[in-house]
């Protein structure tokens, strides 16, 4: 195989009577946007290189289920090579893009030769932002990667173990207090799952503590949770959370996190220190550092979150050969606010960009990208969700079933769909969460390093 | 609940007219032996404390499937609290036993108060031994814990990624050479799964390398693999392995492992250096350090592997109140060789010990432990296995089905059984291995630290 490729390259550069070289598309990031773009180019005569730091595509909307022991990482991930193994015009490259040579049209990789492109697609997404308090990262992990999810799972399960063996009631209360910062969909879903775990799953597991006495706090700075949803759905979500024992505190800002407590401030600037050993960060958006790179190398404009302002066709101003998609893109064409960083936007942009590349190769133009908003949804624990489809808005069990259906539909891989559905059915009937394993030691809770030596120990006895 | 326990303790020590205090059984280790013992005491009027460093029971016979991306850890593990949640006479304690006060009858724990016992059961198993070459641990991981399995999975999958991007044919060959040291059941199962992965699973995944050209070497010091099985089954296993592209080298010793190569020596003392970046250690047995502790504190006799020589009733000489079970025990009563460190022995010893404790509480004696050998089995990749049931010996598909049935039967948890069966069926039909995720950075391959920075990176882009 390699011999053939070498031969082709030799012919292309040396002989004069060969056909035009194949258009090279380099795609950075195998998320929803990048993967949809690659698939959309399946039958195009292009040479695609898909570069990702990870060897798998991750279905991020269900990552909160991994963090709360409902699913295994493999249930919501699929190897990129596996997904694309039959698409012969793409090669997957595991690699770390460190710079872009815009003039020479090459991406520079760590420890690997550069890759030349004719069209470059950057779809490297976003991470969470601590709003300048990066020191909170060690005590309040966010939820973006599989490792994040496993670290949160480890912390949550370990907290119950520490509570079980503690004797001081204040210590027990601090271990049994979970604070989720940020009332968007991720925060709501995490808080709901934590409430469900405390009320149902762990009920009979302990002998000294009562898991039902767990406090789950959901802290939101604005005046309601799910602020991008209509008000009545926010209200429904809050009611459903309350039923799961979650306390919602709106118009509340976090001013300090130290591993043993969280300090919050309400609208009247009243501060309160809440003893809590487990804090999860579900607020703020920080675009991928490749945005900054495009600013320096291609004079791209960035917004406050570091997202790249794109043209109506998702390209960079003055660089039509560079497209930016998904959470990294700030698309505000004919709109008051930029499109939200959600999966449907990324998927549609990926498909649009594939069509754009094909149109350009055919010498044609393309209409600007237009987002078809089919609505948004969030789930709140057991058999409760909210769905906003514009005129159609609903909650409760019907919304949960809709949520389930949509998520299964977009999950990659038939086996994954089947296994996730089975495990959900199982969890639903038995109230169980199977994946309650305290595994790995890569990110021990820093706040209790002294206490947790034996929890972290991975060596066999 | 805690208040109640405190009250009971107070009454026991202060009042004179109370009933006899409840017999306290402390069990260290929640493997097959410990768990079977605890379950066997479900209806006994004892107070059991089950101490484990991990919060889950692990079905070790299938750990090789986690290492080779066929199953997720949660498929072969179940939380101890979940398993025992309805058994009210047991409490599970996550903890690390550091010493035993044999005179005062207490186990000492790291960072926790000591636990008093009337009967102490030590069932903390064994790990692998590098025969004095502990420096090989970093370049040739063994397979005992979930973390081990995930580290092996990461190394194996990363090796293919490095091969795909390498250009030097020698480098590619070194990345595509996997050496498994030790021809016992674990080594055979690992080598078979690696062969299957190379020949079938990864076939279409790469563009530059041919996974079918992978070399899998199984190195065994004795004159045949599966030396504890009858000779004809060893031969059958070797044939099945060869069909999967595995090269078996018997009467071969490993004399050096350096992360880039393995040096082996054959019967004629001829040395050969084999370039190989991935080595897996499946040889040697090293008993849990608590054996050493029993030697010091209770004058227990240990064998060469550090296993504790036990009496016919599995107790320590001069310490009938201390029982040692499973892989940590050397039981040689009326036999030439000690019982092997396999799951059936551990399970039967757990059940025996539960009966022994109950008999003693009733003031009765007990017959010595007798192992009922129902046979042994090992699987070799796809639809091949060997089964030795004494007079009945068979291989091939019937053996594989028997192996499948037995393993599903003993797997803990109905959901686990169903999910494992489904995934096996799926893998069997599609040749796929779902869990091909390179995740976590806790144990990067030391031999290629410089190259693997981007593979190890866990941060989102």
Image (cartoon, coloured by chain):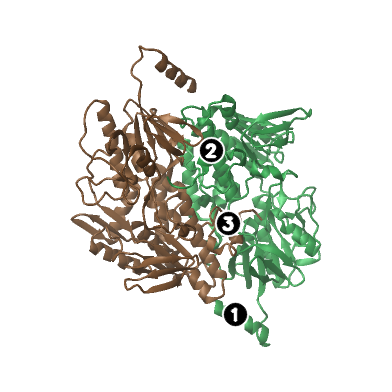
Chain colours: A brown, B green
Labels 3 and 2 within one chain? yes
Q: CA distance from mark 3 to mark 2?
A: 28 Å
Which is more N-terminal, label 1 or label 3?
1
The crowd level at tag 2 (other Cα within 10 Å; few <14, some 14-19, many 20+) is: many
Disc number placed over residue B57 in the picture, else none: 3
Rendered location of residue B187, percent (x, y): 64, 40
The image shows residue B20, relative to residue A443, as above or below, that is below
Q: Which residue is mark 2?
A: B158
Residue A110, relative to residue A390: is it above or below? above
Q: Is residue B327 left or right of residue A89?
A: right
Kindly report the distance in space between the C-alpha atoms of the residues bearing marks 3 and 1: 29 Å
Q: Quadrant of the C terminus of chain B?
A: top left
Report x, y in % for residue A333.
22, 45
Q: Quadrant of residue B137?
A: top right
Q: Chain of mark 3?
A: B
> Please, what secondary structure does the residue beneath circle 3 have?
strand
Which residue corresponds to mark 1?
A: B6
Is the same chain shared between marks 2 and 1?
yes
Q: Secondary structure at mark 2?
A: helix
Q: Nearer the viewer, residue A76 or A185?
A: A185
Residue depicted at 35% across the width and 72% down the height: A269
The first of marks 2 and 1 along the sequence is: 1
Q: Chain of mark 2?
A: B
Pointer 3 or 2: first along the chain: 3
């Amino acid at each position: 195989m390699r011999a053939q490729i070498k031969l082709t390259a030799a012919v292309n550069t040396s002989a004069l009577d060969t056909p035009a070289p194949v258009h090279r598309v380099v795609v950075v990031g195998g998320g929803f946007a990048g993967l949809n773009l690659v698939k959309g180019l399946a039958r195009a005569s292009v040479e695609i290189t898909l570069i990702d730091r990870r060897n798998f595509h991750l279905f991020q909307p269900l990552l909160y289920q991994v963090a709360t022991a409902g699913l295994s990482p493999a249930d919501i991930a699929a190897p990129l090579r596996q997904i694309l193994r039959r698409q012969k015009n793409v090669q997957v490259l595991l690699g770390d893009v460190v710079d872009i040579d815009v003039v020479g049209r090459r991406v520079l990789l760590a420890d690997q030769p550069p890759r030349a492109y004719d069209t470059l697609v950057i779809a490297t997404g976003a991470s969470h932002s601590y709003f300048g308090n990066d020191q909170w990262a060690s005590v309040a992990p966010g939820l973006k990667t599989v490792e994040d999810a496993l670290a949160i799972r480890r912390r949550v399960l370990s907290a119950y173990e520490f509570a079980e063996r503690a004797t001081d009631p204040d210590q027990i209360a601090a271990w049994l207090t979970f604070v989720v910062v940020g009332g968007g969909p991720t925060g709501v879903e995490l808080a709901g799952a934590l409430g469900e775990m405390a009320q149902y799953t762990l009920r009979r597991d302990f002998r000294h503590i009562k898991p039902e006495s767990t406090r789950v706090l959901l802290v939101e700075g604005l005046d309601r949770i799910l602020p991008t949803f209509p008000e009545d759905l926010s209200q429904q979500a809050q009611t459903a959370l309350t039923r799961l024992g979650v306390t919602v505190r709106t118009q509340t800002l976090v001013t300090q996190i130290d591993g043993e407590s969280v300090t919050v401030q309400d609208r009247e600037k009243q501060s309160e220190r809440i003893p809590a050993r487990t804090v999860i960060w579900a607020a703020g958006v920080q675009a991928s550092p490749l945005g900054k790179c495009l600013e320096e190398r291609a004079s791209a404009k960035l917004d406050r979150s570091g997202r790249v302002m794109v043209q109506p066709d998702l390209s960079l101003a003055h660089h039509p050969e560079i497209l930016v998609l998904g959470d990294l893109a700030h698309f505000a064409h004919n709109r008051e606010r930029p499109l939200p960083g959600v999966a449907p936007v990324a998927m549609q942009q990926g498909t649009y960009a594939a069509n754009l590349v094909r149109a350009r190769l055919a010498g044609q133009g393309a209409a600007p990208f237009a987002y078809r908003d089919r609505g948004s949804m969030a789930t709140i624990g057991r058999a409760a969700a909210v769905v906003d489809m514009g005129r159609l808005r609903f909650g409760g069990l019907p919304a949960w079933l809709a949520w389930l259906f949509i998520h299964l539909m977009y999950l990659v891989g038939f086996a994954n769909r089947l296994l996730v559905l089975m495990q959900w059915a199982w969890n639903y009937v038995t109230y169980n969460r199977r994946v309650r394993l305290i595994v790995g030691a890569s990110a021990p809770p820093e706040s209790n390093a002294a206490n947790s030596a034996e929890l972290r120990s991975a060596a066999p006895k």
